[in-house]
Amino acid sequence: MNAVGLAGSRAARGGDGRLICLPGVYRPQEDTRLLEAALDDERVGPGREVLEIGTGSGAVALRAAEAGARVTAVDAAWPAVLAARLNAWRRRVPLNVLHGDFATRSAGRRYDLVLANPPYVPSPDARPPARGQARAWDAGHDGRAVIDRICQAAPALLRPGGVLLLVHSGMCGSDRTLDLLGRNGLTATVTARHRVAWGPVLRSRRAWLQERGFAAPGEQWEELVVIRAHNA
C-alpha cells in the first residue's frame, strides 16, 4: 500500500460509497481504486467465489459482494476486520470477514477470484511489523514479504480458470512478480500502471530508499501496477 495518508476514525470515500475507517485501518487510496477498476473488468456475480487478502476497510470486497459474488475477506488486524464488518452491516451486504493469516484462513478452499492489495513498501526493518498502523504497508527490506507468499499460494487458492488480481508498487519489481507467478504455473501480465505522488511514509525514508536503489535522487512519483494471473 502506498501510504499516501494515515488512517482516521472518520468516513473515507471508497470507489463506490462512503466507508468507516477505524483508527489504524488503511484508508482507500489510489491502489484501492486500481484494484477496484481491475475487478470491474472481471466476471463477478452470483455463483462466483471471491477471496480478498488484506481487506482493510472492506472497500474492494464489498464491491465484489454487491455484484452478487460470495466473498470472504481476511485481514491480520482486528481493527480492519471490525471496520469491514461494520461497513458490510451498514450497506446490508453479506460479507464473510475473517481475522488471521490468509493462508491459514483459506486452507483447503479454492476461489474463482483472489484479490490482494498487500503491504508492499520497502522498509529498513527486515521483518514486517506485528502490530500498529505500519503493518498495512511495511513489507520487509524488499517490500515483498507478503507479495511472495501470495505468489506461492495462488495456484492452490485458484480454481481452474480462476484469476488473481494483485496490486503493488513498481519498487517491488513487477517483473519479479510475473516470473514467480509464471514459475508457479500461472499466466501473468501487468494490466494497469498508474503513477502517484510519494506519500509521507516514502518521503520519511527517502535517504534509505535511495541508498538501497529503490529510488533516484529527487524522485517524487511511485508507479503502481496491477498484475493479473490466470490459472489455466
Image (cartoon, rainbow, N blue to C red):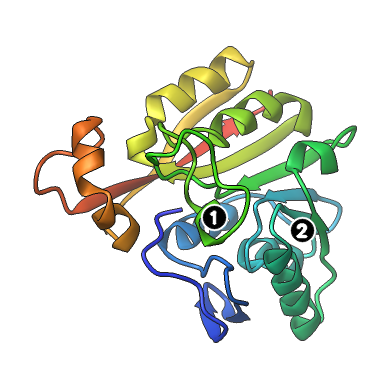
Task: Pinpoint residue 79: horizontal percent, then vertical percent.
Answer: 69, 68
For residue 186, above or below residue 34: above
Per the model, the C-alpha gap separating discs 1 and 2 is 28 Å
Q: In which quarter of the image is the C terminus?
A: top right
Q: Which amino acid does label 2 sit on?
A: Gly
Apparent side of residue 204 relative to residue 44 in the rendered image (left or right): left
Residue 179 or 192: which is nearer the viewer?
A: 179
Element type at mark 1: helix
Task: Pinpoint residue 127: horizontal percent, then vertical percent.
Answer: 53, 36
For residue 17, above or below residue 194: below
Q: Residue at x 46, y 30 (%)?
A: 189
Give whichever of discs 1 and 2 has the lower sequence position.
Answer: 2
User: In the figure, residue 107 lies in which quadrant?
Assistant: top right
Task: Pinpoint residue 68: horizontal percent, then vertical percent.
Answer: 79, 64
User: In the figure, residue 151 lies in which quadrant?
Assistant: top right
Q: Which residue is drawn at 72% across and 70% down?
A: 84
User: In the figure, residue 186 lies in which quadrant?
Assistant: top right
Q: Residue at x 47, y 33 (%)?
A: 126
Task: Pinpoint residue 210: horizontal percent, then vertical percent.
Answer: 19, 37
Residue 212 or 33: which is nearer the viewer?
A: 212
**Residue farthest to the top, as pictured:** 183
Which residue is label 1 attached to?
Answer: 136
Q: What residue type is labelled 1?
A: Ala
Nearest to viewer (mark 1 / mark 2): 1
Which residue is label 2 attached to?
Answer: 45
Label 2 near label 1: C-beta < 8 Å?
no
Element type at mark 2: loop
